Amino acid sequence: MDLFSHAEFDDHEDVRFLHHRESGLRAIIALHDTTLGPAIGGCRMWPYASDGEALADVLRLSRGMTYKTAMAGLPFGGGKSVIIGDPRRDKSPELWRAFGRAVEGFGGRYYTGEDVGTTPADMDLAGGVTRFVLGRASGGSGDPSPMTARGVLAGIRVAVRHRLGRDGLAGITVALQGLGHVGMHLAELLAMEGARLVVADLDPGRAGEAARRFGARVVSGAEILETPCEVLAPCALGAVIDDHSLPRLRCAVVAGAANNQLATERHGDGLHERRILYAPDYVINAGGVINIAEELHPEGYRPERARQRLEVIGERLTEIFARAARREVPTHRVADAMAREIVARARRARAA
Ligand code: NAI
């Protein structure tokens, strides 16, 4: 398993492999870049098929966090942890303490938090041995999903204005894939703005709830990506824009909360070629990290301040869309270049 020649290795600042015999902890923590400030990034627990898969995930996700915090204007860098294990079977207080000690070992250069397969209660256990944990069950900033949904709504408004020249979302059809923590909040906000909703969720109960509460039309998981609409909002899985879905899309805008919506960079180029405006995922879904970063504010966490900071999402997207239009390049490439430039500028300023 190569690290330095790995396809996802991007000159990461610090990569540590953890092993703790007593608790069975096997994990990797990667700090991608701390130029802008200490790295922030959750801890994912997943039964990876191989160590190589875990390494690829942590390298990719930590770089994504650098881009996300940079574009959100936060004074933080990017990092991530992955624990190789089954979240239903392999957790123990001892495992969380071993993980917490490793986080403490970074001396404040890395703040962890919950992610897929981990919970605020797990973070409480890790937090028993380290100060560098965000999103605890006790005294944390709570569920970030409502804030993420608000940010996505703001991003959809900007995308609709740019691509369709329309102010507001009244009468706009939004196809929403996934009615989980973020998706259901987003559906509510969209309905309040007068948008028409078409929804899909693997759980028929959630789709039924959206139909009842917001008058949404329910379609199957297979149909949602092909639904004629102004906006497709992926709020479930990653890699939804792929070779299969791309030629079938019938939307003008792709703007949703899901992480890693593009299967590959090439699929972002495909959206551009089809004149579908893509709101880069890590820009539009930054509400959650904006919210959790507020825990580190010297005056402590205040939701009103986090809500105010969400404005940056609309501002950034406006900038990305304008640059992409001027240069006739895909928005995901513009966003990546802007994120790298923000970090590079800070690095130059520090060196000067
Ligand atoms: P969640 O797990 O609460 O909800 C996901 C929903 O999608 C579930 O209701 C599930 O049944 C549904 N789903 C899964 N596969 C589907 C499919 N093929 N078709 C239709 N529905 C499907 O997750 P959550 O927290 O709402 O997050 C959604 C996405 O947003 C994820 O990709 C997550 O990484 C991303 N995200 C979430 C943030 C947050 O604050 N929760 C912050 C930033 C990104």
Image (spheres, rainbow, N blue to C red):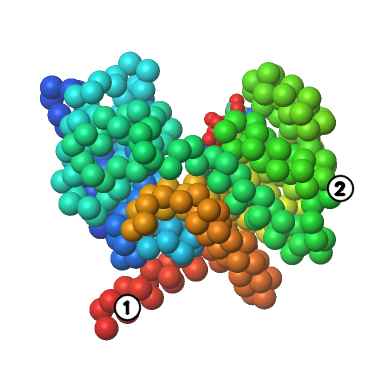
Q: CA distance from mark 1 to mark 2?
A: 47 Å
Q: Residues within 10 Å of mark 2 (few under 14, many from 20)?
A: few
Residue for badge 2: 171
Specify whether 307 is left or right of 247: left
Quadrant of the image for the C terminus? Answer: bottom left
Residue farthest bottom in this picture: 352
Specify whether 50 is left or right of 192: left
Residue under the image location 69 percent in, 19 percent down? 204
Depth check: 161 or 280 in front? Answer: 161
Residue under the image location 32 percent in, 29 percent down? 122
Residue 195 can be seen, yes or no: yes
Specify whether 144 is left or right of 173: left
Q: Is mark 1 within 8 Å of ligand 1?
A: no
Depth check: 334 or 269 in front? Answer: 334
Q: Residues within 10 Å of mark 1 (few under 14, many from 20)?
A: few
Q: Which mark is residue 348?
A: 1
Element on which disc 2 rests = loop
Determine the quadrant in which ligand 1 lies: top right
Residue 244 can be seen, yes or no: no
Q: Position of residue 168 (x, y in %)?
A: 79, 56
Residue under the image location 15 percent in, 29 percent down? 20
Q: How many marks?
A: 2
Q: Position of residue 66 (x, y in %)?
A: 39, 57
Q: Amino acid at mark 2?
A: Gly
Q: Position of residue 340 (x, y in %)?
A: 43, 67
